[in-house]
Image (cartoon, rainbow, N blue to C red):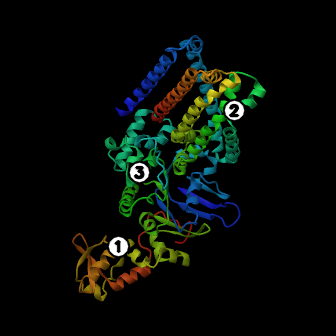
Amino acid sequence: MIRYEEATKRYGAGPPALDRLSLEVPAGETCVLVGPSGGGKTTALKLVNRLVEPTSGRVLIEGRDVASTDPVTLRRGIGYVIQQVGLFPHLDVAANVATVPRLLGWDRRRIDARVDELLDLVGLEPATYRRRRPEELSGGQRQRVGVARALAADPPVLLMDEPFGAVDPVTRARLQDEFIALQRRLRRTVLLVTHDIDEALRLGDRLAVLAAGGRLEQYGTPAEVLARPATPFVADFVGAGRTLRRLDLLSAADALAPAGSAPAAGGDGPAVAAGATLADVMTALLTTEGPSVRVVDADAVLGVVTIDSIRAALRRGTGPQPDAAVDGEAGVT
Amino acid sequence: MKRWLRFVVTPVALAAAAAAVVVWAQHGADGAELAVLRTGRLWVRTREHVALSAVSTLLAVAAAVPAGVAATRPRLRRLAPPLLFVANVGQSVPTIAVLALAFSVTGIGFRTAVIGLWAYSLLPVLRNTVAGLAGVDPAVTEAARGMGMSPGQVLRRVELPLAWPVMAAGVRTAAVVNVGTAALATFVGAGGLGALITVGLDNQRDRILYTGAALTALLALGVDWAVAALAEATGRGTR
């Protein structure tokens, strides 16, 4: 768990880079810091591993103020991935991944085994890639090695600064998918910085939207941020397409027409699975003649969805919560 | 294979050329010339020359590398301009003038010559150390710090290995320049192959003059090869 308490950073005079940030990231969740440049996202991230020290306020990991831990020791316990990857060009892939275990003084055999395990984890065949140099890798492969290096000593907390910023869109989408799958398995507490709202919505269990001057505009789940932008800035930042984006976050089961209503009785038209997104449902609706689509789960028909029931679902709200343990400590819920 | 060949061919060719020069120098030399050009005498002059160049270059490395490291630390960055200024002065002032200045303080001999050569070779080492360290990708050093390396570990494990090729080029320049400049050491009585050149000039003995000049040139080529080989060997072993 990471907790910011009134964390402020000023560089010289003028407006702060980060202005009294308070929020809490529950253990095992991915929190995305998102916003335009100048919003203090990277500053906020670097407060956690003390590459930046706060002007006032504090940051706690598992209830412990990071300022009370020696920075070198602290950083060895936190995974760190940066945009330009920052692989050591004079070392091969295995030595790069082994950086933190070596600093921690693991024995050789344990390091070798761990390196192979991690390369497998990020989808790089160890026998092929161990001895490669960073310059011999593609952008996507470098990024994978960067993630493997960050995970090497099994840190509970992972900081990622624009981790998929330096690759082409196709690779980027694939790396995002891999990240989602990896995080589902590993359940680390992840703090991820991006300026890309689509990436934020895809990867985040929670979003912290930061505006210029380092102000936190809203903190909530992607569904909440899309459904109820807390400020005009957030509404503007998530953009005109936000209604369409919400369709990706809601499922067919969220938008069933009320039982007993006229459309529900006249159930007809194409079928979609209960887990399908509303975007899929819309596609089905747009390509059928009739006014509704049926929602099925296995063989049972759960009900129907119409344009009106989708409107109602969007008005209602928020869609799925990331976790049961939402205690609404900060931001808008 | 090609690299291996280059490594062997160069020193063998240089040694053969030096042997040819010695044979040519002694063949048909008269008594006075032979007094200077005896193999034993040439050997003494060469050793003096090597000692002058090697000691001054090593001292320049010993001074300029730590200075260059210091000048690239965030807290001491202000040191860089004045340090480079001093080193620039060292190289801009003609060596013969530096030797004369040093002579007025430390008198005649080896020490004076070494001081002059040292001042002259500081700049290439310092400049390349600063350039090499400044050229390390900041993303890489930040990753190293973020990973939990102490400042000393970042320097030893990341910055110096990455800056090494550039630094080594500076050492190579300094060493080669020093071999050439050490020919002037004879003016402060420190000997070296320059002594042959001055004796040859003073006595209008071209044979002696040419021998000194040719051996100096061959020595410079040999040193160039040796430093390059050393840099490559150490660079490859960096981990």
Q: Is residue A174 among the parts visible in the rendering?
A: yes
Q: Which of A106 and B26 is in front in this view?
A: B26
Chain letter of mark 2 equals B
Identify the residue shown where x is 40% and y is 74%: A245
Q: Is residue B99 above or below residue A196?
A: above
In the image, A63 versus B214, the foreground residue is B214
Q: Position of residue B165 (x, y in %)?
A: 51, 39
Q: Residue furthest right?
A: B104
Q: Which amino acid does label 2 sit on?
A: Ile
User: Disc 2, disc 3: CB below 8 Å?
Assistant: no
Write down the chain letter for disc 1: A
Q: What element carries label 3?
A: helix
Residue A251 is labelled as: 1
Q: In this view, does B98 lie to the left or right of A7?
A: right
The residue at which mark 2 appears reads as B96
- Location of residue A318 (image quadrant): bottom left
Give, as a three-letter code, the residue at label 3. Answer: Arg
Q: How far apart are marks 2 and 3 (CA)?
A: 54 Å
Q: Where is residue A300 in the image (x, y as percent from the top left)?
A: 23, 73
Q: Closer to the camera: disc 2 or disc 3?
A: 2
Q: Mark 3 lies on which chain?
A: A
